[in-house]
Amino acid sequence: MKKTILAASLIIWAAGASAQSSVTLFGVLDTGVSYYKTTSEFYNNTTRVILPPALANEVGTHQTVLSNSNTLNSRLGFRGTEDLGGGLSAGFWLESGLATDSGLGNGPGGTIIFNRRSTVSLSGGFGEVRLGRDFTPTFWNDSIFSPFSTIGVAANVISTVGTNLAVVKGPGSAVAASDNYLRTSNSIGYFLPPDLGGFYGQLQYAFPENISQSNVPGTPSNKGQFYGGRAGYASGGLDVAVAYAVSDAANTTGLNPAGLPTFINLDEKIKTLNLGASYNFQFLKVFGEFSQVKDESRSTTPNPLLGLLVTRGSGKYTGGLLGITVPVGPGLIKAAYSTVKFDNASGSATPFAPKRDASVDKVGLGYEYNFSKRTAVYATAAYIRVKDGQNNSSIMGATTGTAPYISTGAGVSGYAPSKSTGYDFGIRHSF
């Protein structure tokens, strides 16, 4: 009997040993003091002489805050892997954003939820299949190929405009208004194996998860659907990648109270293409990115005389970035210039139809001093200039922080985003 028990114990022990697993607790706490300032300028797109209110050609806002996530996103996470044998492994990743200035989470209502990443995966010689909430392929180029990534006062302005576009146009979600730009839920991802001589890549598809109803035409809606991919090459000091994605921002079918089609429909897609690269010369690392985002919409409206009217809209956001980092002892100097130009395809400007385009330029300069591999202090400053900010102000009105522009007049006459400045001073600790 004792031999039988011993043999069974050895079998159980061997089974456990053959399925090695590990779980890691990790996180980042990045907190600082930040100052944000915005300036809005008076504009007049009419043929009449209109004076600014109180003769103030400029108005502005400013704010001083205890900020977080200025150089790395503050977070708390758990990740783990299990060796399944035969070259297979299972993994999970749960990561929550933190607001270190208040102790709250970054979820709705300040809750701590795994909104940054929540995935389970299976990996092997074939690569990795990953399910859950994850970053989009196109976001990676905005983040990796920028010295300041996409956070802090000097964040890549391509990312700022991209976030604004997702928030304004959709699709958004209960988790985050910026979904389908930064991250997407309900996704299936595939990643190439890491042993391809420097080549890497991924594909991602996110389900819209809308309901199909047999007695309601036009269902299910594709709003929230996302698909995209990224491919790149990294070897030595070189890293280069291209990405493309399509997000269904809106997809609606108009119905009357009887449930019959009204033919008032809207379909809107946001298509993103970007190319990023960096090269590390050891004494200097250079960064560059080109981005083009198209916001394409098609709406239909019935007209008693002309039949079904089809209206097409198109806005194009063309962005670029150049940046460097220079190691100086235990410290790192960072500098970057980024820009986005908005082209409104609704027509050319005339004396009776003012210019509809806009542009934003940004310059950032920063320094980090590393006390160790896990702890650093930093200082960053940035300046933004917005041209023709009355055009598409909710998207092109990029700021350095949470101090908003004063924006009035709906593109006719009022105040428009013009300038923004800001700085961050803080400390970061990783564990």
Image (tube, rainbow, N blue to C red):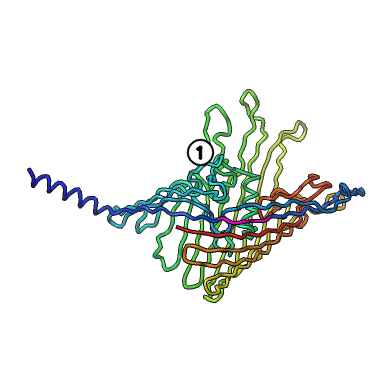
Identify the residue at horizontal 77%, vertical 32% (top origin).
Answer: 305
Identify the residue at horizontal 65%, vertical 44% (top origin).
Answer: 169
- Left or right: where 157 falls relative to 197: right
- Left or right: where 31 falls relative to 27: right
Quadrant position of the N terminus in the picture: top left
Q: Which residue is at the front of the view, 60 or 307?
A: 60
- Left or right: where 44 falls relative to 255: right
Disc 1 secondary structure class: loop
Q: Is residue 260 magenta?
A: no
User: Do we see residue 390 in this rendering?
Assistant: yes
**Numbered range of the magenta stretch:** 31-35
Q: Amino acid at mark 1?
A: Glu
User: Do we see residue 314 in this rendering?
Assistant: no
Residue 312 in percent (x, y) is at: 70, 45
Residue 267 in percent (x, y) is at: 63, 41
Q: Which residue is at the front of the view, 297 or 97?
A: 97
Q: Which residue, given by chain and number where applicable, does mark 1 sit on? A: 209
- Vertically, is 275 above or below 351? below
Q: Is residue 33 magenta?
A: yes
Q: Quadrant of residue 308?
A: top right
- The overriding secondary structure of the stretch rendered in magenta is strand
Q: Residues within 10 Å of mark 1 (few under 14, many from 20)?
A: few
- Left or right: where 6 falls relative to 352: left
Quadrant position of the C terminus in the picture: bottom left
Task: Give the residue furthest to the right.
Answer: 49
Residue 199 in percent (x, y) is at: 45, 65
Q: Quadrant of residue 284?
A: bottom right
